Image (cartoon, rainbow, N blue to C red):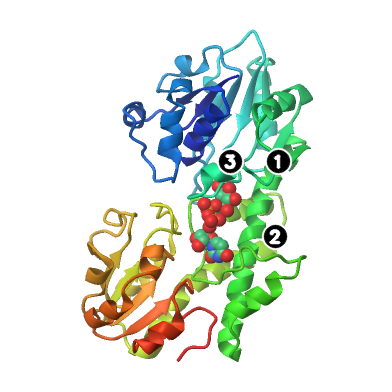
Amino acid sequence: MRIAVFGAGYVGLVTGACFADLGHDVVVRDVAEGKIDALRDGRVPIHEPGLEELLERNGERLRFTASVEEALEDVDVVFVAVGTPPTPSGDADLTAVWTVVDELPDVDRRVVLAMKSTVPVGTGRTVRHRLDERGLENVGYVSNPEFTAEGTAIRDFLHPDRIVIGAFDSRDADVVEQLHAGIDAPVVRADVASAEMIKLAANAALVTRISFINEIANVCEATGADVLRVAEGIGLDRRIGPSFLRAGIGYGGSCFPKDSLALKQLAANSGYNFQLLNAVIEVNELQKRRVIGKLERRLETLRGKKIALLGLAFKPGTDDMREAPSLVLAGRLLAEGAEVSAWDPVADGSGRLDGKVEIAPSALDALDGADAAVVVTEWAEIRDLDWAAAGERMRRRFVVDGRNALDAEALRELGFEYEGIGRTSS
Ligand code: UGA
């Protein structure tokens, strides 16, 4: 089939590359001409393992353009994969979605508009209404949310747990299901509103688990239990399961914070106070800040102390710093009068940290003269660091392991004071 993907961000590029890999003809369209030029030259603007190879391997079936007309020529399915960032009120900003809807020309054969962007429940119905108002009855509408995580997006797309298709007309759902031929996964067919809600509810369930285990971790600290053992012990219960029970300094990224806020706002706008989700979001905010308390307890004051942040990305395997706990931590530390250095193997923090944080060329350089190290992102490079050498460079051998990534015993043997999250410290 011929597919157009509107939006050359994470979701758009992964969607385009994977459908091309499944044998379809794909045109990716973006308004940012610089991005399109780069992609045409084989330069991929984001860090996503395997994406560059996939785009290259399927070069014959993949084109990039800034032109709407070129993208829509003879197209069967148009995927919308544009950004839906939060507005100051926490609602999703759908401006880019509406631009795509309004750009669609009248067609004399059936074309399916498939929504990949995460949108509030009810968006599909409003889009349908707008298409009908414009007389575009030939344009079908399908909600086909994505469940890919950054760093594993290609595997998640090609080997998903499920494919969700919500449609007003089953013919359109059939087309989108056929597009996925070759992918072995259960297909959930639903009405459009339910498909939209599945996406928001899935992310809400995942953040709820994270805030839950983080609160258990905080109670473990207060009572002398170890959250790693607790997570193992409850995760083996088949009804609970082991994933998303890693306690830490909170979730970040381009999806969880935005989508949880959007669902909270959607509920509130509909007259419902989603109390559990409100608490989940608040717990996450407090969790990022708990590191400050851990540092202060040992260093007494942070004024004039040097704190090294190891890792800036919101998780390993990506250069993405959107809503990363590192940003909140850096801001809080600077506000307390600390000197802050940072290192990340991939993410470039220079732009986002306003020049107030020293971005070091290596982890050891970041640790030079530091009174404490904070593991913010559990990169393998940080776990496998030569911690003996690190100790030599630091003013005080003190690590707050915000991701429980390090070997606490080994560090203590090297003379470090070690504090994890939800584990008894010494
Ligand atoms: C997330 C979901 O996992 C995807 O299924 C979804 O499609 C995507 O959002 C989206 O809505 O587009 P992503 O944001 O890439 O994907 O990252 P995750 O791997 O889910 O991690 C999110 C955050 O949660 C990270 O900051 C991570 O450190 C944190 N996390 C995750 C924990 O603190 N503990 C855990 O046990 C798991």
Local packing at callout 2 (Cα closer than 10 Å; few below 14, some 14-19, many 20+) is: some
According to the picture, the residue beneath numbered tag 3 turns out to be 157
Q: Position of residue 197 (x, y in %)?
A: 70, 46
Mark 1 vs mark 3, CA separation in Å: 10 Å
Closest to the observer: 423 or 121?
Answer: 423
Query: Does residue 382 appear to the left or right of 303 in the view shown?
Result: right
| The N terminus - image quarter | top right
Mark 1 CB in 8 Å range of ligand 1?
Answer: no
Which amino acid type corresponds to the residue marked 1 in the rendered image?
Ala
Q: Position of residue 346 (x, y in %)?
A: 34, 54
Observer-side mark, 2 or 3, equals 3
Query: Residue at coordinates 43% horizontally, 60% vertically from top-left?
Result: 324
Above or below residue 336? Residue 82 is: above
Query: Does residue 184 appear to the left or right of 381 in the view shown?
Result: right
Query: Residue at coordinates 64% horizontally, 44% vertically from top-left?
Result: 160
Q: Position of residue 9 (x, y in %)?
A: 45, 38
Where residue 398 is drawn, which disc sits there?
A: none
Where residue 185 is drawn, which disc sits there?
A: 1
Which amino acid type corresponds to the residue marked 2 in the rendered image?
Asn
Closest to the observer: 37 or 123?
Answer: 37
Q: Earlier in the sequence, mark 2 or mark 3?
A: 3
Mark 1 vs mark 2, CA separation in Å: 35 Å
Above or below residue 343? Residue 305 is: below
Where residue 273 is drawn, which disc sits there?
A: 2
Q: Is residue 355 visible?
A: yes
Local packing at callout 3 (Cα closer than 10 Å; few below 14, some 14-19, many 20+) is: many
Query: Residue at coordinates 62% horizontally, 43% vertically from top-left?
Result: 159
